[in-house]
Amino acid sequence: MMMGKNASSEGYFVLLGFSHWPHLEVVLFVLILMFYLMTLIGNLFIIVLSYLDAHLHTPMYFFLSNLSFLDLCYTTSSIPQLLVNLWGPEKTISYAGCMTQLYFALALGTTECVLLVVMSYDRYAAVCRPLHYTVIMNPRFCHLLAVASWVSGFTNSALHSSFTFWVPLCGHRQVDHFFCEVPALLRLSCVDTRANELTLLITSSIFVLIPLILILSSYGAIAWAVLRMQSSAGLQRVFGTCGAHLMVVSLFFIPAMCIYLQPPSESSQDQGKFIALFYTVVTPSLNPLIYTLRNKDVREAARRQVGLDWEI
């Protein structure tokens, strides 16, 4: 008999996570902890360096600092809970905790989609409109673009989270994932959720496919401008900054499309966990490395801040 009972009456969910592979949990705990510490250190490094070094007070590093702060918040919304669940036998999360986790994961993920578009527009303006760049990307406009990214993400999440938690759930409270996400929660429902799944597909298309198309369009224009460049130094600089951003875009959008733009199936559930693990754990830790190792400005700013810019 369907009880139509919501999890709020019980006060918790059970996050199954990787409990089907108990022999992997200790290994995953160590690896995820390492990547999480890398994420914290790397992104804090970029934020602090961009703030301290006057040479990095530019639109590009303003948006990069936003991305780093976003990655810090995104990983912290789910990874600490995952580490607790991997370490001990208890794999529960409170109803309020699940709601909060779902809201922030959706909000921050959507914000990153929009922010990556903004960063690609900044690179387009720098390469294709160099003489007008400082006028186009003035501080006021940059702040408006950043605010618009954050507001769009949190607004979309408020609407989508409320739709998800209005769905009546059965007495079964086991979420077959390592964090509270929409498709996994919809599987607990004892009513038809096709409307919710359609809404998820539409919003995912809006905030994943459209940003990706805009990013690729920006880089198409950049590639055309680069082909007409005569300066080898200019080419190297463009490839250094734009190449790093394209790598970050690939690491974020490819897993997101694999998760949210394919029809759900039982066979893809376990695969989806590992894909989600990649973009929630690995990608945020790689972003600082990509921008640091491939970016001469960041390396030089780091040397200045630690007092290593002497002549050898």
Image (cartoon, rainbow, N blue to C red):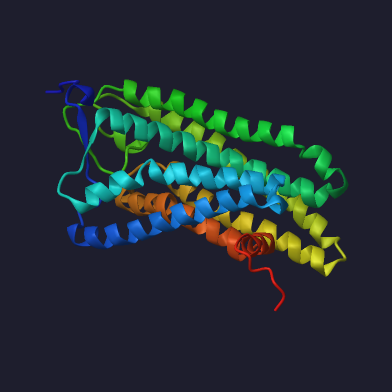
Please state the horizontal and vertical placement of residue 190, each as a whole percent of the image: 23, 26
Q: Residue furthest bottom?
A: 312
Q: Is residue 229 left or right of residue 286?
A: right
Looking at the picture, tell me which residue is in the foreground, 133 or 201: 133
Looking at the picture, tell me which residue is in the foreground, 196 or 55: 55
Please state the horizontal and vertical placement of residue 147, each as a whole percent of the image: 61, 31
Looking at the picture, tell me which residue is in the foreground, 13 or 71: 71
Q: Is residue 287 left or right of residue 220?
A: left
Position of the C terminus by quadrant: bottom right
Looking at the picture, tell me which residue is in the foreground, 306 or 56: 306
Image point (19%, 62%), residue name? 23
Position of the N terminus by quadrant: top left
115 versus 152 height, above or below: below
Please state the horizontal and vertical placement of residue 183, each as a whole percent of the image: 35, 37
195 versus 306 height, above or below: above
Residue 115 appears in view = yes
297 versus 10 height, above or below: below
Q: Quadrant of residue 160?
A: top left
Please state the horizontal and vertical placement of residue 287, each as a whole percent of the image: 53, 56
Q: Quadrant of residue 168?
A: top left
Image point (40%, 58%), residue name? 35
Q: Is residue 143 left or right of residue 69?
A: right
Residue 213 appears in view = no
Image point (45%, 49%), residue name? 258
Tell me how many marks there are: 0
118 versus 292 height, above or below: above
Image point (78%, 64%), residue name? 235
